[in-house]
Image (cartoon, rainbow, N blue to C red):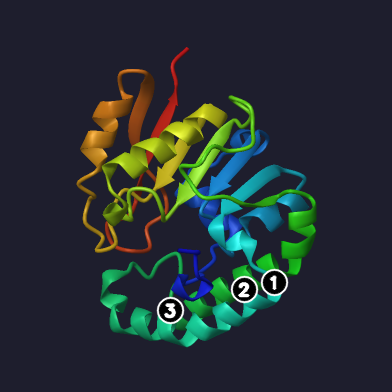
């Protein structure tokens, strides 16, 4: 069955949030970065503006700018209503109000849309579905990122997550996954099994970050090559 755009809830974050979520230093940003499940985030656009190298991968990049723009508008009100109903589950510090949240998210997504067609031409936005093999050689990228995707969607199953991370680690020297909670903000039951699987061959670390919006999601998983 073909992937349907109406099953997607596009919701984009900006580069400042990415840098906080993944503890990306200036040195990290100077490397080649692969970012998985980026959706309509403005991270790629903002990084490119600063002459950094970011390649984004997502299923939604098979759709046109007009289709994505329409879908963003379709889900905007619903998402904000859900946020209002569940606002006690969030930490209103980095983002201080529902109004500011909507402004931050819509601003990020508008930047993404303004860059989308140019970015596709430059192969910065690549249509891809993990765990399928990526069209890159081993160790092409210095860092691979997964924001609000891997470990969060536990219903995809253990094997999917292992295969997806294995392929990411083939093309990336290090991967960072944020957050390490499930959709209900509980620490995912996958985390210990994933750590056990990879620690034999890789350095594995859970690191606290400076970013916490949903209560409890302030940690990321780092898996890197042993030297």
Q: Tag 1, which secondary structure?
A: helix
Q: Residue at x 41, y 44 (%)?
A: 177
The outermost residue toward the top is 227
Q: CA distance from mark 3 to mark 1?
A: 29 Å
Residues tagged 2 and 3 counted as in contact (Cβ below 8 A): no
The image position of residue 141, as x and y in percent, is 61, 32
Q: Is residue 41 visible?
A: no
Q: Report whether 201 appears left or right of 186.
A: right
Position of the N terminus by quadrant: bottom left
Instruction: Tell me which corner region of the image, top left, top right, bottom left or bottom right, holds residue 70.
Output: bottom right
Q: Which residue is mark 3?
A: 97
Q: Tag 3, which secondary structure?
A: loop
Label 2 Cα crowd, 10 Å radius (few <14 / some 14-19 / many 20+): many
Q: Residue at x 79, y 50 (%)?
A: 122
Q: Residue at x 66, y 35 (%)?
A: 32
Q: Which residue is mark 1?
A: 65
Q: Which residue is mark 2?
A: 68
Query: In this picture, is 84 found above or below 154?
Result: below
Q: Report whether 163 appears left or right of 200.
A: right
Residues tagged 2 and 1 counted as in contact (Cβ below 8 A): yes
Query: In this picture, is 103 found above or below 202?
Result: below
Instruction: Tell me which corner region of the image, top left, top right, bottom left or bottom right, holds residue 85.
Output: bottom left
Q: Is 94 or 49 nearer to us in this picture? A: 49
Closer to the observer: label 2 or label 3? Answer: 2
Query: In this picture, is 66 found above or below 214?
Result: below
Q: Report whether 46 appears left or right of 88.
A: right
């Amino acid at each position: 069955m073909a992937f349907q755009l109406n099953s997607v809830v596009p919701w984009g974050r900006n580069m400042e949030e990415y840098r906080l979520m993944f503890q990306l230093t200036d040195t990290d940003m100077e490397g080649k970065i692969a970012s998985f499940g980026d959706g309509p985030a403005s991270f790629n656009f903002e990084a490119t503006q600063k002459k950094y190298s970011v390649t984004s991968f997502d299923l939604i990049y098979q759709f046109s700018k007009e289709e994505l723009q329409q879908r963003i508008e379709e889900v905007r009100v619903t998402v904000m209503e859900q946020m209002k109903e569940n606002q006690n589950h969030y930490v209103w510090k980095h983002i201080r109000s529902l109004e500011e949240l909507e402004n931050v998210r819509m601003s990020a997504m508008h930047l993404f849309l303004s860059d989308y067609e140019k970015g596709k031409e430059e192969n910065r936005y690549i249509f891809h579905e993990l765990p399928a093999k990526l069209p890159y050689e081993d160790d092409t990228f210095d860092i691979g990122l997964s924001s609000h995707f891997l470990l969060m969607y536990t219903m995809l199953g253990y094997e999917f997550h292992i295969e997806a991370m294995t392929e990411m680690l083939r093309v990336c020297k290090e991967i960072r996954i944020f957050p390490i909670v499930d959709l209900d903000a509980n620490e995912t039951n996958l985390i210990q099994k994933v750590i056990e699987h990879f620690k034999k061959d890789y350095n594995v670390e859970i690191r606290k970050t400076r970013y916490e919006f949903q209560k409890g999601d302030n940690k990321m998983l780092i898996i890197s090559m042993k030297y």
